[in-house]
Image (cartoon, rainbow, N blue to C red):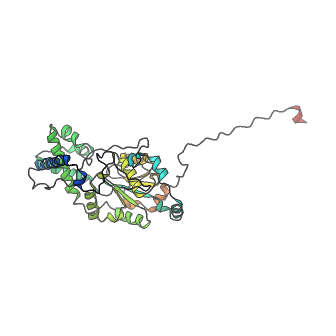
Amino acid sequence: MESAFGFRLIPTTHSSFLPHHLPIKLRLPSLQRSSFVEQQRNRKNVITSSYGSEENGPPDGFQFTPTKIFMEEAIGAEYGEGFETFRPDGPLKVDVDFLNDRLQEGFLKRIRYAMKPDEAYGLIFSWDNVVAGTQALKLSAWKQLAHEEGKEIPDDVHRLLLHGAPDHVLHKVLLWGDEACELERLKLKLSQLYSNNLLKLSEPLEGLKEWLDAVSTARIPCAVVSSLDRRVMVEILENMGLMTYFQAIVTEEDGMDSMAHRLLSAAVKLDRKPSKCVVFEDDPRGITAAHNCTMMAVGLIGAHPAYDLVQADLAVGSFNELSVINLRRLFAHTGSTFMELQKQVVEKTPPRRRLTIDTIY
């Protein structure tokens, strides 16, 4: 991924920084080919064993590796920190202040944004329950898993199923397994069931397409962030007819470690300063991540009640309540010195004048 100021963003979690345009045979040394093939064979055996046979699951493995779908991600950027990238002259740490400084508009852009101020903004949409309603899909995946495994799910644990880590839910709440291999098998099967449900999506949330039409007319760039695989994300967006509205997509391949890092990566891809971006979220933790990145946040009431979204700059029940003028009002009180420390001017009271003989005459 190339940024607007000329360096390539490479996640620090990657174990190799070899050029991706080289063929696999050239990038893998001969001594490592056998281990690579063995890993692929073992991965396929795990997948096959979780389904009983290759007929129940795709023969080439899962459609994506959903490591963070059912997990609660870290918020990130609590102190404005960002992520680390690599350049030919060495590593470079990218934080919130760095991006706000380096993504400043040039002379021509400042003239353009003065005439068309809406184009200076960037919109970032979270995937879950903002672009598509995924809450029911996750519950359906849990119920399908329980049915296929011959288990039962109590009615009072639905919130934990949506927001809890799978390891904790399977081992501590549902008590479905104790051994690590059994828990891993159940997690993989749950992820596959959820992925199958995702691929059936055909409609976005109510009012989203109309809202995207409005911001597209105003030439405001948009991005979507998710922990899904990029190929699956693109396929779902095409099925819903939304692919043309998003100029940037941040997925699991970007290797971001927290919610805030995903937002910063989206800002770089949109070539917009974080302080000029608006995040659409349904999760209070996502709203906190947006504010940590100096972004505005619009809370979508639904998965969480309105009183959980009080920290959002604007809370709405649906996209039908929004208009482009709302974006301008979000930034109405911001400026180059907004929220910066200011010196308080203390007016000194003039000394009282004492009456003397000279003043009387």
Which part of the image, by quadrant, shows the N terminus? bottom left
Q: Position of residue 272 (x, y in %)?
A: 44, 56
Q: Is residue 35 left or right of residue 274?
A: left
Residue 148 seen in the figure: yes
Q: Position of residue 206 (x, y in %)?
A: 32, 61
Residue at 38% of width from left, 63% of height from top? 211
Residue in front for this viewpoint, 31 or 142: 31
Q: Is residue 161 left or right of residue 294?
A: left
Residue in front for this viewpoint, 89 or 291: 89
Q: Is residue 179 left or right of residue 264?
A: left
Residue in front for this viewpoint, 123 or 169: 123
* Residue found at the far front of this picture: 30
Residue 288 seen in the figure: no
Q: Position of residue 359 (x, y in %)?
A: 87, 36
* Residue found at the far bottom of this picture: 217
Which part of the image, by quadrant, shows the C terminus? top right
Residue at 37% of width from left, 60% of height from top? 319
Q: Is residue 291 left or right of residue 351?
A: left
Q: Quadrant of residue 249?
A: bottom left
